[in-house]
């Protein structure tokens, strides 16, 4: 089983940013609901903390609040590109240094964060009536994240 100690600070930052960037990617894909979606992401992290002991790598990942280095976004980069590149790098690092079950647990966690963000706010409708649980744009973002995770 891999742990935070198996990675240097920059590598760990990349791994830690991956799930949060995936969630942010979905949040920014749709319009509205940003507060609800952000709260939903926080709940996924809180639930993962409660499941402490199921995977040591995830335990360490969720033990500290995630942070994102906004440098890539300030320098003209966009969130979709930053999310894709950092997730690819995180998966490469994990594939090189972690056990397959750690990589699989990480992938599941990334998807759970992305899905929680998408499902936190109904799209369309009027005053909470009608609408879709996940917008087409959010689903496209999730599909992109799923494809990226499946490719590694």
Image (tube, rainbow, N blue to C red):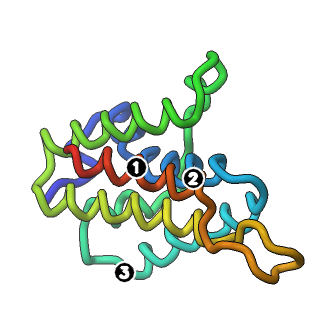
Q: Nearer the viewer, residue 22 or 58?
A: 22
Percent of width and height locating residue 93? 22, 38
98 versus 135 height, above or below:
above
* Residue 84 seen by the camera: yes
Q: Is label 1 in contact with label 2 (beta carbons under 8 Å)?
A: yes
Please tell me whether mark 1 sits on a helix, a strand or a loop.
Answer: helix
Left or right side of 68 for 87: left
Left or right side of 82 for 33: right
At horizontal 24% and vertical 69% (from top left) the residue drawn is 55
Which residue is identified by label 2? 26
Left or right side of 14 for 26: right
Which residue is identified by label 1? 145
Q: Which mark is residue 116?
A: none
Looking at the image, is mark 2 or mark 3 nearer the viewer? 2
Please tell me whether mark 2 sits on a helix, a strand or a loop.
Answer: helix
Which residue is identified by label 3? 51
Percent of width and height locating residue 82? 49, 31
* Measured Cα–Cα span from mark 2 to mark 3: 24 Å
Q: Residues within 10 Å of mark 3 (few under 14, many from 20)?
A: few
Tell which circle, 1 or 3, labels the residue nearer the N-terminal end: 3
Q: Residues within 10 Å of mark 1 (few under 14, many from 20)?
A: many
Tell which circle, 2 or 3, labels the residue nearer the N-terminal end: 2
Q: In which quadrant of the rendered image does the N terminus lie?
A: bottom left
């Amino acid at each position: 089983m891999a742990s935070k100690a198996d990675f240097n600070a920059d590598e760990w930052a990349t791994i830690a940013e991956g799930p949060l960037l995936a969630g942010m990617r979905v949040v920014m894909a749709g319009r509205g609901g940003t507060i609800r979606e952000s709260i939903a992401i926080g709940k996924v992290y809180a639930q993962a903390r409660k499941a402490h002991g199921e995977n040591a790598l995830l335990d360490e990942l969720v033990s500290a609040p995630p942070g994102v280095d906004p440098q890539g976004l300030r320098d003209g980069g966009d969130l979709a590109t930053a999310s894709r590149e950092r997730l690819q790098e995180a998966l490469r690092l994990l594939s090189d240094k972690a056990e397959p079950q750690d990589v699989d647990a990480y992938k599941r966690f990334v998807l759970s964060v992305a899905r929680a963000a998408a499902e936190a706010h109904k799209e369309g409708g009027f005053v909470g009536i009608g609408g879709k649980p996940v917008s087409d744009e959010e689903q496209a973002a999730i599909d992109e994240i799923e494809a990226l995770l499946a490719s590694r």
